[in-house]
Image: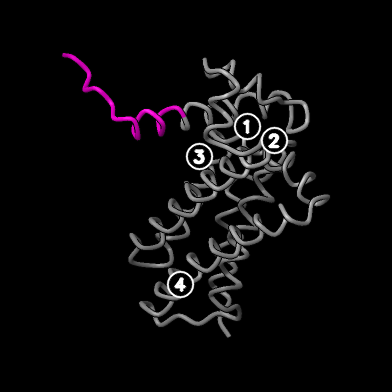
Amino acid sequence: MLRRRLTQKERKEETRQLLLESAVEIFSELGFHGASVEKIAEHAGFSKGAVYSNFKSKEELFLALLEQQMNLQVNNIYQIINNQHSLSYFIETMNDHFVSVVKENQKWMILNMEFLLYVMRNESVRYKWSCMIRESVDRISKSVAKLMLKENHEVTLSSEEIAWTIFSLENGLAIFNFINGESVPMNLYGKALKNLLSASE
């Protein structure tokens, strides 16, 4: 079966996505500073010009990667919260989600740490990342509030504080799990979340 001929817009989007996938491999292998636009383009099978026709700089490319990954993370959590009918199922599903994230996203643990060091030294980039995080927290906070209201459940933390804690737990434990592996207690994420949401006023 012949493949449908892509439009110019579709070809550009396909090229952009291939460059993003290439950037994951190169950034995780060489680090943000060690990676070059040339190497990213070459790995994807394009010229350097293809990168600059989609991204203004290496920094913008990395920000696009970060935004894509954060959107995926938030969408997954958002779907989990909205599909649950009770807190117990929510906690169990979130724990399963965390386990899969740790197994599948080890490259992103490296990239997140790499970029964290970079943004700590660059205020303008830090502001952009901060805005992404803020938007993610707001979205998850609203979903958490709906779930708590559905069960008429009260805890000592606000829905916004719970959203911050969910992100902090996931990212912090994922980093330690990457470093220490089996030394990190199994199902710790689920247990911590359960204690958090079970703490009534």
Residue located at (50% from left, 70% from top): 141
Q: Residue at x 35, y 35 (%)?
A: 9
Which of pointers 4 and 2 lies earlier in the amino acid sequence? 2
Point out which mark residue 142 bears: 4
Numbered disc in front, either 2 or 3 = 2
Residue shown at 56%/18% (left/top)? 47
- Check if residue 7 falls in the magenta segment: yes
Q: CA distance from mark 1 to mark 2?
A: 5 Å
Query: Which residue position holds label 3?
Result: 100
Tell me if residue 160 comes above or below residue 201 in the rendering.
Answer: above
Kindly identify the amino acid type of the residue bearing the numbered disc 1.
Answer: Lys
Q: Which residues are magenta?
A: 1-15
Tell me which numbered mark, 4 or 3, is placed earlier along the sequence.
3
Query: At numbered mark 2, what does the secondary structure look like: helix, strand or loop?
Result: helix
Q: Are marks 4 and 2 in contact (CB under 8 Å)?
A: no
Across and down, in percent, residue 152 comes to: 40, 82
Q: CA distance from mark 1 to mark 3?
A: 13 Å
- Per the rendering, the mark at residue 110 is 2
Q: Position of residue 90 (x, y in %)?
A: 43, 60
The colour scheme of the drawn protein is: one colour
Q: Residue furthest right?
A: 121
Residue at image point 22% right, 18% down: 3
Q: Are marks 4 and 3 in contact (CB under 8 Å)?
A: no
Q: Position of residue 127 (x, y in %)?
A: 70, 59
Which residue is labeled 1 in the image? 107
Q: CA distance from mark 2 to mark 3?
A: 17 Å
**Distance between mark 4 and mark 3 Cα atoms:** 24 Å
